[in-house]
Image (tube, rainbow, N blue to C red):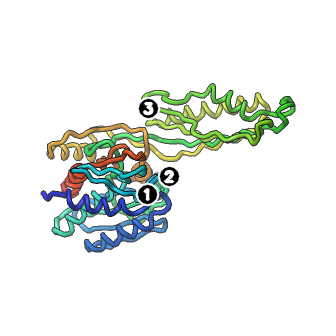
Amino acid sequence: MKNFKEPCQELFLSLVAIDSPAGHEQAVSDFITKKLKSFGITAKTDAYGNIIAKIPGQGAPLMLCAHMDTVEPGRGIEAKIKGDLITSLGDNILGADDKAGIAEIMAAVEYLTRNKVTHRPLEIVFTREEEIGSYGAKNLDYKSLKAKEALVLDRSGGATIIVIAAPFITDLVIDIQGKAAHAGHPEKGIDAIKIAALAIGQARLGRIDEETTANIGVIRGGEIRNGVPERVSILAEVRSHVRSKMNKEVNSIKKIFEKEAKRGQAKISIKATVECDGYKYPLSDPLVKSLGQLWQSLGEVPSFEKVGGASDANELVKHGIKAVTIGYGGMDPHTSRESIRVSDMAKITDLLVRFVLK
């Protein structure tokens, strides 16, 4: 099998040099479309700006997916290469999440098309705005897609990771409306911050069990130091690998806040939105099993993980596509310490090429 180090490194460094924070992916989209065209592949964008490219083949179609956006600080990135290791030069992220995934998919596609290799039909999907809520995947043109299986390259921590479970997530927006008053006459007001504090003190937060967590991430309230605050807005979330457990914790938080608001004679509004659906696969699942066996055949030890975060795979599963998130090889994403090894990108590209031949 071909050594994929050179094409992976070239593609990755080209992508890293293009700014693409969430919501500003057009330049990297143009680069990808132009590069695919040079491989003889026509790519289209759907109404939301996601890239979709279809490559004919034999057998059941397979989707390969990665996202185009990065987190901040991700502008003007300069990459530093030291031997096999690529890092960011400065305080920026590197952007391996998820430009390494894009580079690996494109290197595999280039090899297959240039060498006229027989493979499964491929649907290549590069999404927008994954980092801020998988909005690209939420708005993907699913009617134009036929694949019922997908590999999503979006897991950090090593090359051989296969994600077998990701959580359901519910977002909570809690607004408490009290009554303003001068701080010197607190009995004339209704303190929204105090009510919120009493409720937060009773809520189960952090690690609930091995499958479930709850978190309050944002609290906004008050206008002036010497005034009784009349309003507080709270942003929270609950996530679990089991939907019923998630629902239980969501309901518990709602009841606690409603009780304290009633006791404090405040008005309250609670909006709970299921942000994404979870998924869980047994090790015996055919897609998971075949990925593990292929890594073993390449002399690597696969790592099967249950993760606490979501990806585009969650949204694909919601739309009836069996999606498995796999490693793209990077380490320490969303930090200035982010790094990736070219050898790991090459291994993953090799895996992709061999997998689509099946």
From the viewer's side, name the closer residue of 155 and 227.
227
Residue 11, position as x, y percentages in the image: 28, 62
* Residue at the extreme left of the image, as rendered: 1
Crowding around mark 1 (Cα neighbors within 10 Å: few <14, some 14 to 19, many 20+) is: many
SS at mark 1? loop
From the viewer's side, name the closer residue of 82 and 99.
82
- Residue 104 appears in which quarter of the rendering? bottom left
- Residue 3 appears in which quarter of the rendering? bottom left
Residue for badge 2? 132
Q: Earlier in the sequence, mark 2 or mark 1?
A: 1
In the image, taking residue 343 as reference, residue 91 lies left or right, namely: right
Q: Nearer the viewer, mark 3 or mark 2?
A: 2
Q: Are the residues tagged 2 and 1 within 8 Å (C-beta)? A: yes
Label annotation for residue 69: 1
Q: Is residue 57 above or below residue 176?
A: below
Q: Earlier in the sequence, mark 3 or mark 1?
A: 1
- Taking the spot 50% from the left edge, 52% from the top edge, the residue there is 132
- What is the C-alpha distance between the residues marked 2 and 1? 9 Å
Q: Is residue 149 visible?
A: no
Q: Quadrant of the N terminus?
A: bottom left
- Give the amino acid at mark 3: Glu
- What is the C-alpha distance between the residues marked 3 and 2? 23 Å
Q: Earlier in the sequence, mark 3 or mark 2?
A: 2
Q: Is residue 216 visible?
A: yes
SS at mark 3? loop
Residue 232, position as x, y percentages in the image: 70, 39
SS at mark 2? loop
From the viewer's side, name the closer residue of 151 and 348.
348
- Residue 16 appears in which quarter of the rendering? bottom left
Residue for badge 3? 211
In the image, taking residue 319 as reference, residue 234 lies left or right, namely: right
Residue 301, position as x, y percentages in the image: 20, 39
